[in-house]
Amino acid sequence: MGAVSGRGRFAEWADRQEPRLRCPAVVALALAGDVAAAADLALTVAPGSRDEWQERLLRDVRGRDRELVVAHVAQGAESANRQLVGYARLGLVPPGDSGSAPPGYYVLGLVVERAWRRRGIAEALLQQLIALASERTGELWSFYDVRDTASAALHRRVGFRPERRGTIGFPGLPSTSVDELVRLSLPRDTARPRSDGAGWAAGLSVQGFPAALPLAGLRLGLEPLRVAHAEEMAPLLDDAKLHAFIGGEPATLSDLRERYRRQVVDPPSDGVQRWLNWVVRRRRDGRAVGTVQATVIRRDRALTAEVAWVVATEYQGQGYAREAAQVLVAWLREQGVETVMAHVHPDHQASQGVARAVGLTPTLLLVDGEVRWQG
């Protein structure tokens, strides 16, 4: 497969190489308009003609058992000027078409443009494929050339486990290399939106609102919240210091499960607002360090978002809140959100600094003792 660069042309990789991403990549389901740019990217790492690749990728966009996910970055000051820098393909390989490999859902390709590698984009693409696959199957398969150390590291990092080595080839995707066949067990997480049978766009854009997608930053990744995250997050958030400015008490595990269930399973359905939540992870070791959230509100066809952030006490003072908020706000702007606001306690200097970093300025409005920042 060549998860980062395509079969036979591998990404350069070093175990402790620092990522260099300065602006977030927006990962989303591909539209037909993305196919031409994705085909051009495919041709940089794989054989075939442009017409063949466009036909293949268009089937991914339109097929019931296939998906194409793409990553865009904004170019220059205008967020509307976007460049496609990566894609990932998910497909069902039925019995009889799988050759020597088991039938099932496979990562059929994952490509990131050379200039944008080692910035978390490949992982964000792969995480989105995992999220899509988890609604359809209990396991996801992938394979890569055993010489492709970048792909091997990426698959290990997200939880794939090796099954066997050999030559893996499907019709239309031949192989002459020695491949590592890997498998990821998927929890059937009912907290994620389900398809209505007309493709996955309905699950990723609810009533005209954006839906949470994996996002990549310089040091951090933003992972869409699931109910199952409660077990991981409860010990981090069980800290009275986190409530010094916002009041209240730390939630118990059962309380946190119920809160997450309300946020991702039973969000508001009034057509006026939508809740979006992410767990913030440190990319170098996968540790959860906090959460970010956005309440997106529609007013007279315009979208406004109220954002908030929490970083566990032990991870504070390292700029994580600032980076996570910057990634979140940049993505919200990309989704068409015109106004962003946050409510910050007047004595909370650290959060005021985060608000300034994402372009917000304080207003004269006080809401429950907190200053509204807006931009």
Image: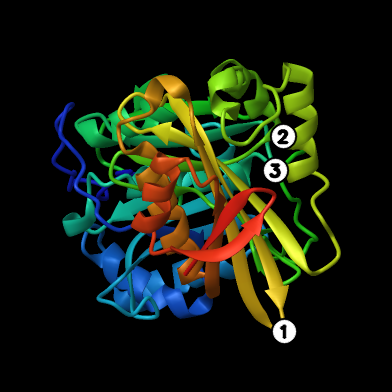
Residue farthest to the bottom?
Answer: 300
Which quadrant of the structure image shows residue 70?
bottom left
Question: Which numbered disc flags the more N-terminal residue, 3 or 1?
Answer: 3
Mark closer to the observer (3, 1): 1
For image coordinates 36% across by 78% down, the residue present is 51
Q: Are marks 1 and 2 in contact (CB under 8 Å)?
A: no
Question: Which numbered disc flags the more N-terminal residue, 2 or 3?
Answer: 3
Colour mapping used in the image: rainbow
Judged left or right of residue 302, residue 324 is left
For image coordinates 40% across by 80% down, the residue present is 80
Q: Which mark is residue 251?
A: none
| x and y percentages locating residue 227 in the rendered image | 71, 32
Judged left or right of residue 276, residue 4 is left
What is the three-letter code of the residue carrying label 1? Asp
Q: Are marks 2 and 3 in contact (CB under 8 Å)?
A: no
Q: Residues within 10 Å of mark 1 (few under 14, many from 20)?
A: few
Q: Secondary structure at mark 3?
A: loop
Q: Quadrant of the N terminus?
A: top left
What is the three-letter code of the residue carrying label 3? Arg
Q: Is residue 373 above or below residue 317?
A: below
Q: CA distance from mark 2 to mark 3?
A: 10 Å
**Exactly how many numbered labels are in the figure?**
3
User: Which residue is identified by label 2?
Assistant: 189
What is the three-letter code of the residue carrying label 2? Asp
| The one of 99 and 152 positioned closer to us in this rendering | 152
| The one of 259 and 26 positioned closer to us in this rendering | 259
Question: Which numbered disc flags the more N-terminal residue, 1 or 2?
Answer: 2
Q: Secondary structure at mark 2?
A: loop
Q: Which mark is residue 300?
A: 1
User: Which residue is identified by label 3?
Assistant: 136
| x and y percentages locating residue 182 in the rendered image | 44, 27
